[in-house]
Amino acid sequence: MLKITFPDQTVKEFNEGITSLEIAKGISEGLARRCLAAKINEEVWELTRPIHSDSTLRLITWDDPEGKSVFWHSSAHLMAEAIEALYSGVKFGIGPPVEWGFYYDVDLGEKTFSSDDFKNVEDKMKELAGKNSAFIRKPVAKKDALEYFTEKGDEYKLDLINDLEDGTITFYTQGNFTDLCRGPHIPNTGFIKAVKLLNVAGAYWRGDEKRKQLTRIYGITFPKQGELEEFLKRLEEAKKRDHRKLGKELEIFHYSEKVGMGLPLWLPKGVIIRERLENFLKTEQRKRGYTPVMTPHIGKKELYVTSGHYEKYGKESFQPIFTPNYEEEYLLKPMNCPHHCEIFKSKPHSYRDLPVRLSEFGTVYRYEQSGELNGLTRTRGFTQDDAHIFCREDQVKAEFISVIDLVMHVFEKLGFSDYTAQVSLSDPKDRSKYIGSQELWQKAEQGIIDATKETGLKTVTVYGEAAFYGPKLDFMVKDVIGRNWQLGTIQVDYNLPNRFELEYTGADNVKHRPVMIHRAPFGSMERFIGILIEHCSGNFPLWLTPEPVVILPVSEKYIEYGKKVALQLNENEIPAFMDDKDDKVGKKIRDSELKKIPFMLVVGEKEEKDGTVAVRRHGKGDLGVFTLGNFVALFREEAVL
RNA sequence: GCCGAUGUAGCUCAGUUGGUUAGAGCAGCUGAUUUGUAAUCAGCAGGUCGGAGGUUCGAAUCCAUCCAUCGGCUCCA
């Protein structure tokens, strides 16, 4: 007999070798039908795997994230089975579940796979799913595993098996398809009722640019057709919020092939948003002891040779600009920090001066790979809300706390609550790639960890993700199609102070090297605004909205009164303009709604007579008649930061 | 940069197996209308069909190439 502990802590006894499926059936048939897997001692197992020791058990259904993972992982196998059945000589790489669905990397030989082939594969998958083939787990010896895939001629699986330890290898078979797999899987393919392939892409084997590129096929499946439809509907909705679409519609930015790819042109309304964000941050930074500086867009090549950026990125970047004096070379600045280091060096510093916090909205240029460019989220010219803090080692933690506080404040004011804060630390196994003494790193990493604790920031810690020059803390936010982007960033740097030989005089009258902290709450104005557009679907917080109020005269006769209203609002620092086109109000309202203008003020005979406005709110409709004073109050109440 | 897809008017799209002067709606302009909470009517104008080539009697349509965009991969100081 063995003891099984359930999530509610009740313990029951079962015969040795019982499966989770049998236990589920014992509870209820309905539950057993919904179960996809079971969590045995915190490890996900398939339902049919016999249990041989005392264990905790949690049954997993579609409603659990683990359930979806198992479901989609099994779906990847189903897709592989379908592809193998349709196209001969296919070799398989890896086929994991992802956040929404799954993919499989396949080598189709000469065949090119495109979205035209989706239907074929989908139909085959549905056909095979209908066979209700069980997923059968089978442990195999490494020797046998190698033999199987040698015979099949699949070098990718052999590559994978070679990295595995004998005794840990399992195969899974469903129908005619056998795959190397850790598992677990759903009981049988019949659970998969709805199938949709999403896209194809090239993907290098093992993510290595030098190896062969395989075809990555993305798909998603559901246990019910209705859920697939809901998913596709949500995808459609998300596309409507895409900042590239809204950026065009709301006239925020524009790209011109003539100007160059990745070089956004900011339109008047975009500039209003951007300037307001800049002013907001400038005010916050003034409160927190930052000193604004300004530096030019180019700098001598030697500057970046000193900083080390030229050596690391020179070849893949914009090439130098030459002057009439042949030997002089200048580079478009890829970073602001070298310039700021020179500002720090412009005068001697005492330990009493520190920290020195130099801030600049600095525009930088980086030659990003063409395939990486994306709307405002990845550009070749962008403006960082940059600052560099030069401080003593003992000040690192306090400065970190202050910066975290600033970033959190900024995010909160802009309604970003759904972000991930990622602490990137050094790889404890390989210290060779990092610059700076281990002692310094330890202090800095501990400082970051303590700082996040003290500020109550919830973080994810990743080892080995630190920059070569120091550990960092990044704030990541997802875009509308689920891609993660780094917005705010805080990075400790031991490299540049050395390279630029920065120093200050300590209390001991000896020269010391300061520590440098790079930080940018928005990250880049371009990317931040891009994500912000998606986040609010183009309905910006009122204080950021370029055109918050439009006055809509019912006819030409009331244009004069409309002008008066606009003037009075402007005097109250409320930007308002009038739609004086020769259209009916219905049309003007429609236009204004599509432009997502928050407040529409309809003025006609009644309003002119009473000195009022009829207020309509975007997305909400008619709010009724307001005196001008009341409207100003209503507006101000919402527009406060 | 790599793999796949896409590119027709300012925007959203149509254009049959290659066949005369390439279509529509919205936006724009002109005129009529003077309008009360999501599209008033009419007229006009707008395109070397992403670029430069090739095949053909004939190309938006077929081919190769380049550019840009989209989805990934790789990269991201």
Image (cartoon, coloured by chain):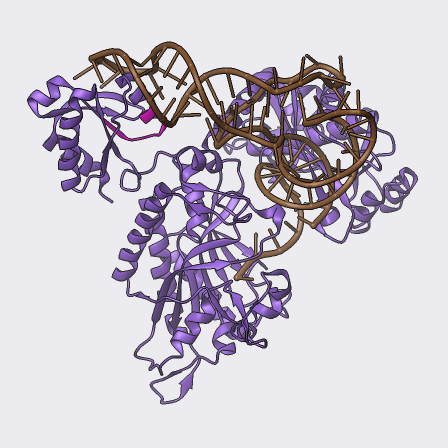
Chain colours: A purple, B brown
- Relative to A64, say whether A208 is above or below: below
In-front residue for pair A146/A499: A499
Q: Position of residue A223 (x, y in %)?
A: 62, 21
- Relative to B12, say whether A316 is above or below: below
**The quarter of the displayed image where residue B49 is located:** top right
Quadrant where the N terminus of chain A sits is: top right
**Residue A26 visible from this viewpoint:** no
Total label count? 0
Q: As drawn, which residue projects farthest toward the bottom?
A: A509
Is A109 on the left-hand or right-hand side of A510?
A: right
**The quarter of the displayed image where residue A109 is located:** top right
Quadrant where the C terminus of chain A sits is: top left
Q: Residue at x 47, y 70 (%)?
A: A338
Q: Position of residue A166 (x, y in %)?
A: 81, 49
Q: Residue at x 17, y 28 (%)?
A: A562
In-front residue for pair A586/A102: A586
**The quarter of the displayed image where residue B34 is located:** top left
In-front residue for pair A421/A476: A476
Q: Residue at x 40, y 79 (%)?
A: A345
- Relative to A163, say whether A224 is above or below: above
Q: As drawn, which residue projects farthest toward the left?
A: A610
Q: Residue at x 12, y 17 (%)?
A: A605
Is B23 on the left-hand or right-hand side of A384?
A: right
Is B36 on the left-hand or right-hand side of A465?
A: left
Q: Position of residue A37 (x, y in %)?
A: 64, 29
Q: Position of residue A457 (x, y in %)?
A: 40, 52
Q: Which residues are magenta?
A: A591-600
**Residue A177 visible from this viewpoint:** yes
Q: Indicate whether residue A632 is drawn in magenta.
A: no
